[in-house]
Amino acid sequence: MSLTTRCPHCDTPFRVSADQLQRRGGMVRCGACRNVFDATQALDYLDGEGEATPRAEPASASASASASASAARRLPAAPPTLHEPLPPLPSAATVKPLREERASQAAPAEEEEAPTTTPREPGPLPAFLRQGGPGSVSRILLTAATAVLSLALPLEALYAWRTDLLAQYPSFRPDAVALCAALGCEVPLPRHPELVAVVEADMHPLPGTEVYEFAAVLRNRAAFPVAMPALEITLTDSFNHILARRVFKPGEFSVTPADGPSAGIAAAGDVSLKLAVEAPGLAVVGYTVYPFYP
């Protein structure tokens, strides 16, 4: 018994074989109108006498004879062949419609149950996170050390910058000096040699000696008190050659007003100082004075 199918576009029947349907998944091309369609959707059986019988509804003998005769007149002499490759079907003993085959392939996927995920049990905490034991003592000590360092850092910064801070806020200086005296530290005055100038100076020999008396006035041009500088005095001859150079630190010369060297020079204030310079055997003609901080 042969197989036949019918083009749904031009209604032309032609013979097909089971091998053709298996190799091309049931897809064929009509030899009359070149339409590609699924042959399994209009598949009929052709008996030995050339009568085409529908698979679903068998016809009467007379109707079958007339239908087979008309089908034989319109049937092509040779079955059409496929000109474009199609994906092959898996081997099967019988030809099944494409929709049934796709349904049979999709059925197991629908029957499979969706994978279920089970929550993981939380593992044990690390030793350093457990409560109690030596780890908790270490955490307490670490927390205390962090708190102490957090307080010590700003105090260290205040101590390191105490001089500049008190220069900007001089009203806090008396309290800072008292506190630092109780703690055994000092609050030095700012040192800015560029803000200290020599506005008056004089040096003359003392009669009957080889000692020269030096007097000068120092002026503080800053808006805050500054420390008392040291003085470098250079003695020169008539050719401006250096004869001697000596440095006088605060405390080695007298200061007016007599507040002591630690009092420094008041903001925008002047101080007068005097000192004796020994120059035995030197013919001193000139001098230079330079205030600085050692």
Image (cartoon, helix red, strand yellow):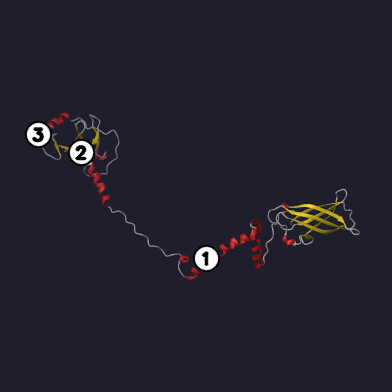
Q: Disc 3 marks which residue?
A: 63
The residue under the point 24% across, 35% down is 37
Q: Disc 2 marks which residue?
A: 41
Q: Disc 1 marks which residue?
A: 143
Secondary structure category for the residue under label 2: helix
The answer to which quarter of the image holds residue 18 is top left
Q: Horizontal placement of 264 versus 124: left or right?
A: right
Q: Position of residue 123 (x, y in %)?
A: 41, 63
Q: Type of residue at label 3? A: Ala
Q: Type of residue at label 1? A: Thr
Secondary structure category for the residue under label 1: helix
Tell me the CA gap for discs 2 and 1: 82 Å
Q: Is residue 47 visible?
A: no
Tell me the CA gap for discs 3 and 1: 104 Å
Q: Position of residue 38 (x, y in %)?
A: 23, 37
**Is tag 3's residue or tag 1's residue first in the polypeptide sequence?**
3
Select label 2 or label 1 by which is in front. Answer: 1
32 w.r.t. 88: above or below: above
Placement of the C terminus among the 4 image quadrants: bottom right
Q: Nearer the viewer, residue 44 or 154?
A: 154
100 w.r.t. 72: above or below: below
